[in-house]
Amino acid sequence: MRTALVPGSFDPFHNGHLEIVERAARLFESVVVAAMRNPQKGAPLFDFAERKAMIEESTAHLGGVRVVAMTGLVVDLASEVGASAIVKGLRAVSDFENELQMAQLNERLSGIETIFVPTHSAYSFVASRLLREVARFGGDVSAFVPKPVATRLAERFPVGGASRG
């Protein structure tokens, strides 16, 4: 069985992430979505359990997708789950520069290949960091995230409930 690993911080999981998982699910028999904590991104908005639940709910319509939390190296998890490839979405050239470096290192460490999937232009500007900021200041980001995520963001940051100053 060919398995893809789709790693990311997914904080929060948005429609661009969902698109990449859906496309991976069409290309592979099995997809493992790995929610991780990126120490370079500061404290997460949602903990692992919350992110895992949101991703599971958002991908429930897909067969062969499972969600795990990870804390170690991507290549170690890829080996553990039997992944034949790591799948990463690209929004812009700046994403490619960072992801290429990681892909080359991962391949050198483990032999596992990385497949880059360009994000649809409708999602090319969507970033979790921006969505967190807009939501934190009371903006409505429901058009950019799956419904389970929109629900949790609205609970955490009621629309119009924070100062827009």
Image: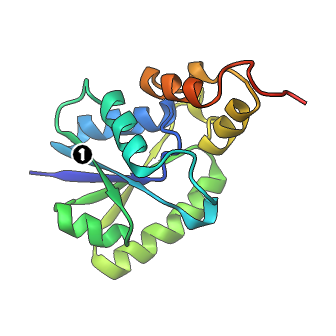
Residue at screen point 77% across, 27% down: 162
Farthest-out residue, bottom: 109
Judge whether 13 appears above or below 43 on screen: above
How many labels were placed on the picture? 1
Residue at screen point 41% across, 33% down: 18
The colour scheme used here is rainbow
User: Which quarter shows the C terminus?
Assistant: top right
Farthest-out residue, left: 1
Residue at screen point 26% across, 27% down: 60
State the residue position of label 1.
31
Answer few, some or many: residues within 10 Å of disc 1's Cα (few below 14, many 20 plus, some between 14 and 19).
many
Amino acid at the residue labelled 1: Val
Would residue 153 be found to the left or right of residue 47 on screen? right
Label 1 SS: strand
Pinpoint residue 126: horizontal percent, then vertical percent.
62, 35
Quadrant in which residue 27 is drawn: top left
Would residue 38 be found to the left or right of residue 32 on screen? right
Quadrant in which residue 63 is drawn: top left
Pinpoint residue 140: horizontal percent, then vertical percent.
67, 20
Residue at screen point 21% across, 60% down: 84
- Which is nearer the eye, 155 or 89? 155
Judge whether 87 appears above or below 66 on screen: below
- Which is nearer the eye, 129 or 136? 136
Pinpoint residue 150: horizontal percent, then vertical percent.
52, 24
Quadrant in which residue 19 is drawn: top left
Pinpoint residue 59: horizontal percent, then vertical percent.
31, 31
Farthest-out residue, right: 165
- Which is nearer the eye, 138 or 146? 138
